[in-house]
Image (cartoon, rainbow, N blue to C red):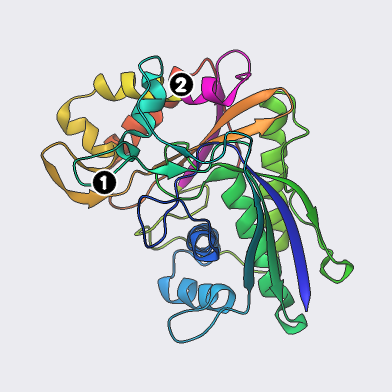
Amino acid sequence: MLKVKFDIEVTTPLFLAGANQEEVELRPPSLRGPLRYWYRALIGGIVGGNLAEVRRRETEVFGSAEYGSPISIRISEVTLPEQGLSAFTQADNQPGRNYLFWSMDKTKDRSSRQYYPPGTHFRLILAAHEKNRQALKEAIIALWLLTNLGGLGARSRRCAGSLTICSSTLPSALEFNLPRLSPEDASSLDELANTLTLGLQEIQRFYKAEKRSELQNRSFDILSPATCSIWVLSPSNPWKKVKEALEFVGRTYKEYRQSLSDEQRKALGLPFGGHKGRLASPLHLHITAIKAGYICVATLFRKNALLPDRLDINSKFIVRFESNRELKL
């Protein structure tokens, strides 16, 4: 059996729930779904959005309703910081944070959502039999994408549930050109951009034997130059504290959203207000911890459901940050 161990730190509030929606619970299924999402986006770019092929590849790594996954996921040693679990409450002096996580506050039907606070640590183990070595490598790549571009749990597209891989243990039998699993050595926005670019290039090299198919389907989020853009964002310097990053990003997003017309706001996701329908936001906002502080990583997907003018609405949010650099996919 091949096992890979990761020590992971929670960077921003992590809202997860099990059967009881008011209580926080970190379990393997909480991680499996986001891993599938980022793997699907990655493979979609390789096979040209061919849904049948994407589903086949996804089943080989993460299983399906009919077939179990060859990858075992275990979570253990969840260690909370001194203050322990927290329940989300609105804070008068943090309107940006309030805006990012507004739906986690109490309602007439439930109490405030609990969350794992920044500084929480846990051990993640991915394991597979020797014959499934390739699938395990691809699961590790999906984890890299998740921990550098996305997040876990509720409000993960709005900075919640961002994670950092602090260390990893890889068996010699699994050695391959892994993307760097953590950007913690970066000390500036440019260094983080370079680290992420190198990681994405490593992933491309991993799949270099596969000829990329021409993109023919954009009905889901796909990680490719034609359908995705990634930026690193900050003021002139990285934020020193994670709460400063959340406050700045949330306040900037709130002010930008309020500058749009009701019709334009539909591009940011549905439902809202009196508008029904369902359209997940195409914009993922993630907070990355670097040596010098914190940086925001923004990933914008472009798919058929979004018209060009609506994509432009999302990308104009990016230029509100004094320092912004787009990565080359």
Three-letter amino acid code at disc 2? Glu
- Residue 76 located left or right of residue 54: right
Q: Residue at position x 40%, y 47% from top?
A: 154
Q: Position of residue 105 (x, y in %)?
A: 31, 36
Say which residue label 1 marks. 110
Where is residue 2, by image quadrant? bottom right
Percent across and percent down for residue 317 are 39, 25
**Which quarter of the figure is the N terminus placed in?**
bottom right
Asked if 70 appears above or below 201 in the picture, the reply is: below
Does the CB distance between marks 2 and 1 fall below 8 Å? no
| The furthest residue to the bottom | 66
Alpha-carbon span between mark 2 and mark 1? 25 Å
**In the structure shown, which secondary structural element does the residue marked by tag 2 occupy?**
helix
- Of residue 20 and residue 64, the one placed in the foreground of this image is 20
Q: Which mark is residue 247?
A: 2
Which region is colored magenta? 228-247
Q: Residue at x 27, y 38 (%)?
A: 267
Q: Residue at x 73, y 48 (%)?
A: 181
Residue 244 highlighted magenta (yes or no):
yes
Q: As rendered, which of 55 and 156 lies closer to the eye?
A: 156
Say if residue 156 shows up in the picture: no
Query: What amino acid is labelled 1 in the image?
Result: Arg
The C terminus, quarter of image: top right
Residue 206 in view of the camera? yes
Is 14 positioned to the left or the right of 136 in the image? left
- Residue at 74% in and 25% down: 187
Would you identify the image quadrant in which residue 142 lies?
bottom right
Neighbor class of circle 1 (other Cα within 10 Å; few <14, some 14-19, many 20+) is: few
